[in-house]
Amino acid sequence: MPDSEYPDDDELIEDVIRHSHGSRHRVREGIGVDDNGNVVQRNTIGLFLRDLLVIAALALIISMVVKTFLLRPFYIPSASMHDTLIEEDRVLVNLLIPAPFDLNRGDVVVFEDPGGWMPVVQPPEKEPFVAFRDGALETFGLKPEESTNHLIKRVIGLPGDHIVCCNAYGQLVINDVPIQEPYVVFGDNTAASGIEFDVTVPEDAFWAMGDNRYNSQDSRAHQDLPTGGFVPYENIVGRAFMINWPMERIEFLGNYPEVFADVPSREPEE
């Protein structure tokens, strides 16, 4: 065969360079290859719906994991935490407190009823569809739980703390240090509590009080119960760190470290 039918080496090299540096073939969306190697039109609507379902499923799984291990929404049904929290506020609760992160004085926490704090209330009956819808939304953390067994209060005393109310100025005294509480609603009163008490917090428990001191059924009101008014750590759901609804009230919740800065820690009694 004549040499002219074959390109010489230089031409081959130029051809390779041209193809390697030339424009690339672009993948066309909606085009596929069937089992026989034929180019066919793909169902783009079906692919879009499939991708949408996958994304939605992943979002729900992530939401469930977050709700189970990291954050849970709750709503505020009562006035016991005015003015920090008001009725119908929604709060986000950090589930990583008290473990692995520590509980601190001043934290606003959600906890389960230690027993006898709340009256037994039967939840209202719902239509089957409404019950299913609400249950699904609550499972995935998209709706605050309609719980009748949870409370929200501020942590005043930690294990070992000796708390007395009140001194001559109407202040709480923790471990012999009086504190000034800017978050408290006094109404027409001047003392930090209308109920006098002298308690020492046992191990693995805390002393809880509402910010609306004269309208809060908290540790003070339950000293006659087996727990002595103290809340066991095992009942803590987590720390409320943010109001996330309604829009005009969105803000982070502080724990006022300056209020307790001078209060020394004490070891709980054996």
Image (cartoon, rainbow, N blue to C red):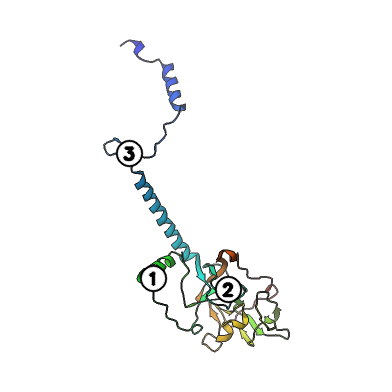
Residue 212, percent from left and from top: 61, 79
Residue that numbered label 3 is attached to: 41
Question: Is residue 131 visible from the viewing direction of this image?
Answer: yes
Q: Which structural element holds mark 3?
A: strand
Q: Earlier in the sequence, mark 3 or mark 1?
A: 3
User: Disc 1 residue type?
Assistant: Ala
Position of 249 relative to 170 (above/below): above
Q: Residue at x 64, y 82 (%)?
A: 162
Q: Are marks 3 and 1 in contact (CB under 8 Å)?
A: no
Q: Residue at x 36, y 40 (%)?
A: 30
Q: Residue at x 48, y 69 (%)?
A: 144
Question: Is residue 270 visible from the viewing direction of this image?
Answer: no
Q: CA distance from mark 1 to mark 2?
A: 26 Å
Residue 122, percent from left and from top: 42, 80
Q: Earlier in the sequence, mark 1 or mark 2?
A: 2
Q: Quadrant of residue 251?
A: bottom right
Q: Residue at x 57, y 67 (%)?
A: 243
User: Disc 3 residue type?
Assistant: Gln
Mark 2 crowdedness (10 Å alpha carbons): few <14, some 14-19, many ≥20: some
Q: CA distance from mark 3 to mark 2?
A: 58 Å
Q: Is residue 200 left or right of residue 73?
A: right
Which mark, residue 249? Answer: none
Mark 3 crowdedness (10 Å alpha carbons): few <14, some 14-19, many ≥20: few
Q: Earlier in the sequence, mark 3 or mark 2?
A: 3
Q: Residue furthest bottom?
A: 224
- The quadrant of the rendering that contains the C terminus is bottom right
Q: Which structural element holds mark 2?
A: loop
Q: CA distance from mark 3 to mark 1?
A: 44 Å
Residue that numbered label 1 is attached to: 131
Nearest to the observer: residue 254 or residue 122: 122
Which mark, residue 86? Answer: 2
